[in-house]
Amino acid sequence: MPSSPPTSAARMPRVILRAFTLFELIVVLSIMTILASVVAPRYGSAVARYRLDSAARRVWADIEQARSMARASGSTKVLRFVPTTNSYSIVGYRLGSSKASDYTVKLNQPPFSITLESASFAGSADLQFGGFGLPADGGTIVLRAGSEVRTVTVDSASGAASIQ
């Protein structure tokens, strides 16, 4: 007896479906959770360090700007640091066409979001540069973000600022 031709189902190759088991998914999720718990605190402290370094460079640049303006104009320029409001300003300097107020930087707001812990220039919170760009007194500005601290120091002899 002749054999009958194969049916269409017999001609089709079997497709084996593969999937992850519940155990494999739990293992992968556990590993991801452990990695996230290790990485998250490091990321947070890295962001705080970046903000603090950026703020310290901004303070340094503004000190150099006031020093340069005093030298160029031959008159006294004052940077007023106010730790209670986490801000400082260059007195008498207005940015652009603004006539409203002095140039002010608020360190507790984005992009910095840090704390101006202290500013001391021979007992005063004002840093004054005379007409030759030399400070009346040297001193320090202390900035803090979490446990990280940066100190901007102004040399009393030259007026040069440095970040430590």
Image: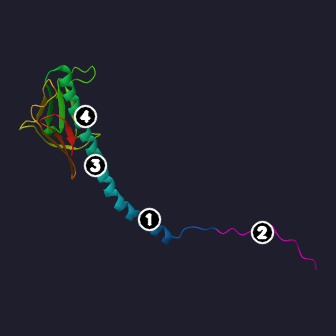
Q: Which residue is located at x 42 percent, y 66 percent?
A: 31
Judging by the rendered image, the residue that carries numbered circle 1 is 29
Which one is nearer the viewer's eye here, 110 or 138?
138
**Amino acid at circle 1:** Leu
Judging by the rendered image, the residue that carries numbered circle 3 is 49
Badge 1 marks a residue whose secondary structure is helix
Sequence-wise, the earlier of marks 1 and 4 is 1
Judging by the rendered image, the residue that carries numbered circle 4 is 61
**Amino acid at circle 4:** Ala
Q: Is residue 8 left or right of residue 38?
A: right
Q: Is residue 99 left or right of residue 118?
A: right
Span highlighted in magenta in the image: 1-16
Sequence-wise, the earlier of marks 3 and 1 is 1
The answer to whether residue 137 is magenta is no
Distance CA(mark 4)–CA(mark 3):
18 Å
Q: Is residue 101 visible?
A: no
Distance CA(mark 3)–CA(mark 2):
66 Å
Q: Quadrant of residue 160?
A: top left
Badge 2 marks a residue whose secondary structure is helix
- Looking at the rendered image, the disc whose residue lies closer to the viewer, 3 or 2, is 3
